[in-house]
């Protein structure tokens, strides 16, 4: 997990997980639309997952 990805996850969460697949992007986008904090948390969890 690079510093740039973490910073991007805090500023705009869906953009940080775009390389992890379409499903991850859509989940984080929906959570971000519901609220910024759930989107950031989901993005950081997805980025922290090694798979």
Image (spheres, rainbow, N blue to C red):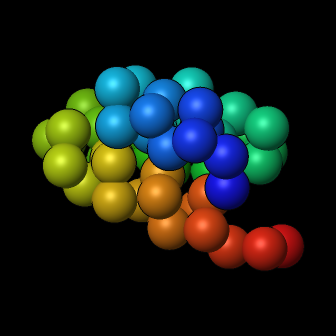
Seen from the viewer's position, the closer of residues 27 and 7 is: 7
Which residue is depicted at the point 77% across and 48% down? 20
Is 34 positioned to the left or the right of 49 in the image? left
In which quadrant of the rendered view does residue 42 lie? Answer: bottom left
User: In the rendered image, which quarter contains the C terminus?
Assistant: bottom right
In which quadrant of the rendered view does residue 50 lie? Answer: bottom right
Q: Considering only vertical position in the picture, is 42 above or below 34? A: below
Seen from the viewer's position, the closer of residues 6 and 30 is: 6
Q: Considering only vertical position in the picture, is 12 above or below 10? A: above
In which quadrant of the rendered view does residue 16 lie? Answer: top right
User: In the rendered image, which quarter contains the N terminus?
Assistant: bottom right
Q: How many marks?
A: 0
- Whether residue 15 can be seen here: yes
Is 41 positioned to the left or the right of 36 in the image? right
- Whether residue 29 can be seen here: no
Which residue is depicted at the point 70% across and 33% down? 18
Which residue is depicted at the point 48% across and 30% down? 8
Q: Considering only vertical position in the picture, is 1 above or below 15? A: below
Q: Position of residue 12 (x, y in %)?
A: 40, 25
Q: Position of residue 11 (x, y in %)?
A: 34, 26
Q: For the view shown, which residue lies furthest in the bottom direction?
A: 50
Which residue is depicted at the point 57% across and 41% down? 3
Is 49 positioned to the left or the right of 42 in the image? right
Q: Position of residue 30 (x, y in %)?
A: 37, 40
């Amino acid at each position: 997990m690079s510093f740039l990805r973490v910073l991007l996850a805090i500023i705009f969460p869906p953009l940080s997980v775009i390389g992890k697949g379409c499903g991850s992007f859509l989940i984080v986008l929906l959570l971000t639309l519901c609220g910024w904090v759930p989107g950031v948390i989901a993005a950081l969890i997805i980025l922290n997952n090694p798979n």
